[in-house]
Amino acid sequence: MTSTDLRKELHQENRLSWNEATKGHNSHKGNQAKFFQEGGSTLFPEEKELLGDIAGLSLVHLQCNAGQDTLSLVRLGAIVTGVDISDEAIAFAQKLSQEAGIPASFYRADVFDWLEETAKRGEQFDIAFSSYGAVCWISHLNFWAKRIANVLKPCGRFVVVDFHPVAMMFERDYSHKFPYFREGKPLTWEDGVGDYVAESSGALAPWGYETGIENFRNPYRVHEFQWGIGDIVTALLQAGLTLEVLKEYPYSNGCKLFERMREASGRRMFPPEDVPNLPLMYGMVARKP
């Protein structure tokens, strides 16, 4: 497989866009170190249920963003490594880890490069984990799944909680605009990664939302990849993993994906009552034999 197959040039454009977006996102989140020092966690019940007891286990958090969930995983007793393509996100994660006094290892790398290099070193983990807006940045599912399998120990698990590809078919006003089947063709957004923290009205900053950067505009475009549930499951199966759990949820955690979403307890976001329900998230657990 070559860098052309992986569309590495698109990955680098995504890196630049995420660098800018991360600044905007964290501008709304205030004193995050204090939140963690006081025992806070950014994890939702869904990922904790799928992960189970992770105390004492080695875990790699792929596409870890700015490290808030990574540190929350450490709080559950795991030995955690975070990996993300964004320079800004990893720099923030390292600083937050130090200031919060929660030890974790962070690496700035394209996830494909990191997985390949880690597999070559023979390093393996009990759990690989990804969540909330992760799979849409994966340009080649089979390569991704095989490399995840290679960095898992025997009986190790890959756990993912993510926004449902069915939800990605709709515009913010619930109009059907995008295809479900794209066969790996990129979808380019000229306005880049947006400020979804501001759009979610603070639901992604449970310790207190701050105004921060207003009217954020990203100068760098991004490229996403639409993969169906069947694509994802098949890639994991072909990588030699065994699917143990597949769940779908009629709400999104923290993030207001659409207009007029209703916030329920636990920061769960539902469509308004005049819109039929649809799957907004899914969760999977796949185990290495």
Image (cartoon, rainbow, N blue to C red):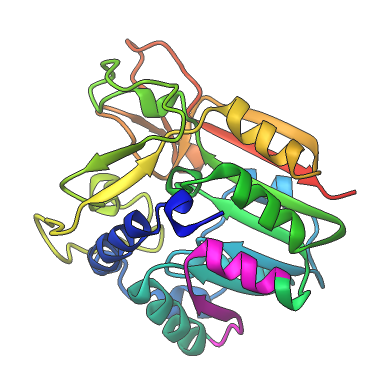
Answer left or right for 219 relative to 208.
left
138, above or below 168, in the image: below
Residue located at (49% from left, 49% from top): 134
Residue 184 x %, y %: 45, 35
Can residue 40 be seen at all in this image of the molecule? no
Residue 121 x %, y %: 73, 78
Residue located at (41% from left, 10% from top): 276
Residue located at (54% from left, 67% from top): 113
Magenta highlight range = 101-119
How many numbered marks have been drawn onto this rendered protein structure? 0
- Residue most extreme to the left: 215
Answer left or right for 108 relative to 195.
right
Which quarter of the figure is the N terminus placed in? bottom right
Answer left or right for 208 relative to 108.
left
Q: Is 233 contained in the magenta span? A: no
Kindly indicate the quadrant of the structure image that contains residue 79: bottom right
Residue 2 x %, y %: 51, 57
Residue located at (32% from left, 66% from top): 29
Can residue 220 be seen at all in this image of the molecule? yes
Answer left or right for 17 relative to 256.
left
289, above or below 107, in the image: above
Q: Is 112 contained in the magenta span? A: yes
104, above or below 85, in the image: below
Front one among 71 and 115:
115
